[in-house]
C-alpha cells in the first residue's frame, strides 16, 4: 500500500491510496479550482497505518489526548515506540470512556433527568437518546476530572 499525501492552498490535507497527482482537484471540498501539491508518498502498510494514526492523534485536543493517556496508561509506551499501527483514536476514546464508566465517573442524564425516557419518536420509542435508557451518562471530561482520576490511583 502506498499513501499519497497532498496539501491544498486552502489548507486541506488530502490522503489517497490511488496515486493522486498534481492534477487532482481537492476532494475534501470538491473545489474544482484547487490543485493539490504532493507532500509525501508513504510506502508500506505499517508505515501508512502509523501515519494515519499520528495524523488523527495530533489533531485531537490536548485535553482529550491527556484524558486518553490517563485512562490507558499503557498507551504512552506504544506511542513513544511508534507501535501504533493497529490503533485507532476513535477506538482508544471508546476504551477510555468504558473505563471511566466502570470507575463510576457518571452523572444523572441531563436530558431525561434520570428516568431513561424522553418524548416519543418513531425510531427509539420513548427511550432517551442521550443515555440510551441507562439513566446515567459519563461526567464531562475536564482538567479537574483528569486530576481527580490521577489522584485516586
Ligand atoms: Zn437520558
Image: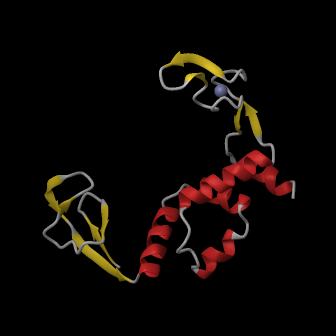
Residue at 48% x, 62% y is 56
Give the position of the N terminus as an image quadrant.
bottom left
Coordinates of residue 44 in the picture (x, y in percent): 40, 83
Q: Is residue 88 left or right of residue 145?
A: left
Coordinates of residue 89 in the picture (x, y in percent): 55, 60
Considering only vertical position in the picture, is 72 above or below 81?
A: above
Considering only vertical position in the picture, is 97 above or below 25?
A: above
Q: Quadrant of residue 72?
A: bottom right
Considering every residue shown, the one lying at the far bottom of the view is: 43
Coordinates of residue 63 in the picture (x, y in percent): 62, 53
Coordinates of residue 66 in the picture (x, y in percent): 66, 59
Residue at 60% x, 18% y is 118
- Give the colour scheme of this rendering: secondary structure
Q: Is residue 73 left or right of residue 25?
A: right
Give the position of the C terminus as an image quadrant.
bottom right
Ligand 1 shown in quarter: top right
Considering only vertical position in the picture, is 4 above or below 65?
A: below
Residue at 70% x, 50% y is 98
Q: Nearer the viewer, residue 99 or 69?
A: 99
Considering every residue shown, the one lying at the far right of the view is: 152
Q: Quadrant of residue 32?
A: bottom left
Q: Nearer the viewer, residue 94 or 36?
A: 94
Q: Is residue 84 left or right of residue 7?
A: right
Amino acid at each position: 500500500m502506498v499513501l499519497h499525501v497532498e496539501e491544498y492552498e486552502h489548507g486541506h490535507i488530502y490522503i489517497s491510496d490511488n496515486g493522486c497527482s498534481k492534477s487532482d482537484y481537492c476532494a475534501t471540498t470538491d473545489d474544482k479550482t484547487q490543485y493539490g501539491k504532493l507532500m509525501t508518498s508513504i510506502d508500506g502498510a505499517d508505515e501508512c497505518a502509523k501515519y494515519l494514526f499520528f495524523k488523527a492523534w495530533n489533531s485531537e485536543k490536548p485535553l482529550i489526548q491527556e484524558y486518553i493517556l490517563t485512562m490507558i496508561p499503557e498507551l504512552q509506551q506504544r506511542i513513544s515506540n511508534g507501535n501504533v499501527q493497529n490503533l485507532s483514536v476513535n477506538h482508544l476514546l471508546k476504551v477510555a470512556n468504558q473505563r471511566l464508566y466502570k470507575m463510576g465517573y457518571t452523572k444523572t442524564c441531563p436530558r431525561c433527568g434520570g428516568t431513561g425516557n424522553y418524548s416519543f419518536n418513531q425510531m427509539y420509542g420513548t427511550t432517551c437518546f442521550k443515555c440510551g435508557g441507562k439513566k446515567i451518562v459519563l461526567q464531562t471530561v475536564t482538567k479537574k476530572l483528569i486530576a481527580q482520576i490521577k489522584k485516586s490511583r
